[in-house]
Image (tube, helix red, strand yellow):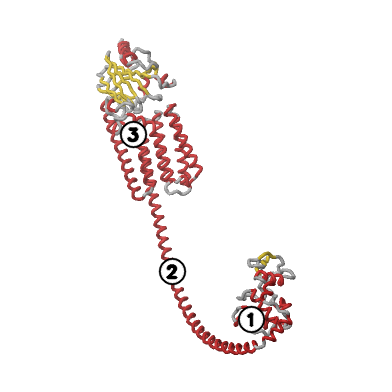
């Protein structure tokens, strides 16, 4: 009988009479997944039902809500019955998701309703308690029960991460949480300012990209933990919605630009960098489409593609000897470990604690510290490289200075030697000038004798004219009709030289083409250029070839003609005529052709036929 009475009392208690969530003294956890077993839901497709009206609807199991497709245009109501079986009277229902745009919360106690409305799309001061999460106070006496109704309005399905904690547990946890977040953001601020100062002192762009990466993560973290909405833009919910929708995109872009500077991805692999840029463009497009049209959490995970490519770039950089790649990979692996903990906690595979909740923050904190250390090491290595190059440069300058001094000494010695040589040359030149003076005196005496001879020869004009008449000499006008210009003279010489065919004096080649001077020939085999006057009596003559022709003609016509008469007829200096006549007469004697006359004078022109 005693056991039967106990059983009746037991089944009549709130724990067994309905689906109530029982509050106990030992309830002290951050998050109790079992609370979802007591929640029921109702889908309001009209979006018009109030809390008073919704209480009469037939609610269904939460499992059905989790397993059916989500309709963002409908309003989803949730009901939770709560019974207090503890000595604590003040409890807080906490919704751990800070991204819910609108929440309507109602508590029914007997027949009274306590209604509250808030959300991330509303001003922060609409919240019942100034906390980064959504907190709704529940006052229950021991063995008292209540029923709460709340509706979500979100573009995507919510996982209903809900917990109920007594005031002491909540305040203790909130204190620890804010203490940890204060340290977290404080360290990030210090790291950002520190590297910003380094940027201003070194002008290395990698430090400004590091600061931007830290800034984008802070914005993303503000989005995740709701601290930004509480402390920064609480009066501007539009900014909150914008940051919630864009912070992840800004984070992956900031991480790419920083990684590109840290690892020099373009230098590692242009192909990998191209794939990485394409993946970022695709992620940006999918991210935009998802936020505007689809609102699915699945597409958010596409950011793992550029993240994985950046990880591959880190591995390649390490293999190619990048000094900072080692620290980059260590930091990235640690962050991946913390990210894995974060995912496991979300799937309820590991216990929920302040560490597992903020494992991403802890991982990022260690990551940026390692990154900063890696950049410091990179800067140190770069500084050592610059110092080494500077030392090598100084050594090279010293070596150049030594070589310069040696060269100057050698040059001074050569200058002294050359000065001495010039002094000796000047002495030799002075002696030569003295000899030339003596020779000039001899020439002057010789010229005086020539003048006497020329005067004697000029008296024999009649005999000379008679000789010209017998040889049928030509006048200058008649001669100029035969050889009117240099072109005619050169042509005559060329025809005379090569009358039997061309033969190169250098290589015996018989093929030629036009040379660089009139009527010259260039060998097709060795490119030797032979002028029309080469190897003739006119070679290197300073007298015009037309004048030389007529002078030779006059000499051959009358070998006794004086240099004075030649000078008068040609308008050339008497000394020049005398020297030219002497040269021609010597050539006649050398050739043994003293009987050559002006009729067959061409035999005199070619003077050498040997090779050069």
Mark 3 vs mark 2, CA separation in Å = 66 Å
Q: Is 452 placed left or right of 308 in the picture? A: right
Which residue, given by chain and number where applicable, does mark 2 sit on? 404
Which residue is outermost to the top?
1
Q: Pick whichever, 51 or 201, lies toward us.
A: 201
Q: Kindly report which numbered mark, 1 or 3, lies closer to the viewer in this rendering.
A: 1
Check residue 566 in the rendering and tell me which mark sits there, or answer none: 1
Image position, residue 12 (x, y; %)? 31, 12
Rendered position, 155 above or below 513: above
Judge left or right: residue 554 versus residue 396.
right
- At mark 3, the secondary structure is helix
Between discs 3 and 2, the one toward the N terminus: 3
Label number found at residue 574? none
In this figure, which residue is indicated by the disc labeled 3? 222
Mark 1 → mark 2, Cα distance in angstroms = 64 Å
Earlier-in-chain disc, 1 versus 2: 2
Which sits in the foreground, 196 or 415? 415
Q: CA distance from mark 1 to mark 3?
A: 116 Å
Q: Secondary structure at mark 1?
A: helix
Query: Which residue occupies the foreground of this view, 413 or 276?
Result: 413
Residue mark closest to the camera, 1 vs 2: 1
């Amino acid at each position: 009988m005693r056991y039967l009475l106990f059983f009746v009392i037991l089944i009549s208690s709130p724990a067994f009479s309905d689906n109530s969530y029982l509050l106990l003294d030992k309830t002290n956890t951050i998050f109790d997944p079992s609370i979802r077993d007591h929640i029921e839901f109702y889908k309001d497709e009209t979006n018009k039902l109030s809390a008073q009206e919704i209480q009469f609807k037939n609610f269904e199991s939460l499992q059905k809500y989790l397993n059916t497709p989500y309709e963002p245009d409908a309003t989803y109501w949730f009901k939770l019955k709560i019974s207090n079986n503890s000595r604590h009277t003040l409890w807080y229902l906490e919704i751990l998701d800070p991204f819910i745009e609108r929440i309507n919360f109602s508590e029914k106690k007997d027949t009274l309703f306590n209604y509250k409305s808030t959300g991330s799309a509303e001003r922060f001061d609409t919240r019942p308690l100034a906390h980064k999460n959504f907190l709704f106070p529940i006052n229950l006496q021991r063995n008292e029960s209540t029923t709460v109704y709340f509706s979500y309005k979100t573009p995507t399905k919510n996982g209903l991460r809900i917990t109920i904690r007594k005031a002491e547990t909540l305040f203790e946890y909130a204190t620890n949480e804010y203490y940890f977040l204060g340290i977290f953001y404080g360290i990030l601020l210090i790291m950002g300012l520190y590297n910003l100062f380094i940027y201003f002192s070194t002008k290395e762009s990698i430090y400004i990209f590091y600061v931007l990466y830290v800034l984008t993560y802070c914005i993303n973290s503000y989005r995740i933990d709701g601290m930004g909405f509480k402390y920064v833009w609480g009066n501007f919910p539009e900014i909150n919605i914008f940051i919630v929708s864009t912070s992840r995109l800004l984070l992956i872009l900031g991480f790419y630009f920083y990684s590109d500077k840290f690892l020099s991805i373009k230098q590692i692999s242009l192909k990998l960098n191209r794939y990485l840029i394409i993946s970022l463009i695709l992620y940006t497009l999918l991210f935009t489409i998802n936020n505007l049209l689809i609102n699915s959490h699945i597409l958010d995970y596409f950011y793992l593609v550029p993240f994985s490519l950046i990880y591959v770039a880190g591995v390649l950089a390490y293999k190619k000897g990048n000094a900072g790649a080692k620290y980059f990979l260590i930091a990235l692996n640690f962050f991946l470990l913390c990210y894995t903990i974060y995912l496991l906690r979300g799937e309820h595979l590991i216990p929920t604690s302040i560490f597992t909740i903020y494992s991403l923050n802890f991982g990022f904190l260690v990551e940026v510290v390692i990154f900063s250390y890696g950049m410091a090491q990179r800067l140190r290595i770069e500084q050592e490289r610059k110092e080494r190059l500077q030392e090598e440069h100084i050594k090279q300058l010293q070596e150049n200075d030594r070589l310069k001094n040696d060269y100057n000494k050698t040059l001074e010695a050569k200058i002294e030697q050359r000065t001495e040589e010039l002094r000796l040359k000047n002495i030799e030149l002075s002696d030569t000038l003295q000899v030339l003076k003596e020779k000039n005196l001899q020439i002057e005496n010789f010229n005086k004798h020539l003048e006497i001879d020329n005067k004697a020869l000029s008296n024999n004009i009649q005999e000379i004219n008679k000789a010209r008449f017998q040889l049928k000499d030509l006048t200058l006008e008649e001669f100029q009709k035969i050889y009117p210009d240099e072109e005619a003279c050169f042509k005559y010489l060329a025809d005379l030289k090569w009358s039997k065919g061309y033969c190169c004096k250098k290589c015996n080649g018989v093929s030629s083409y036009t040379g660089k001077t009139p009527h010259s020939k260039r060998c097709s085999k060795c490119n030797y250029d032979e002028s029309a006057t080469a190897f003739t009596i006119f070679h290197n003559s300073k007298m015009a070839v037309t004048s030389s022709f007529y002078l030779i003609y006059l000499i051959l016509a009358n070998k006794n003609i004086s240099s004075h008469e030649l000078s008068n007829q040609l308008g050339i200096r008497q000394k020049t005529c005398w020297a030219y006549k002497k040269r021609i007469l010597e050539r006649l004697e050398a050739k043994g052709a003293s009987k050559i006359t002006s009729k067959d004078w061409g035999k005199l022109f070619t003077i050498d036929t040997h090779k050069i």
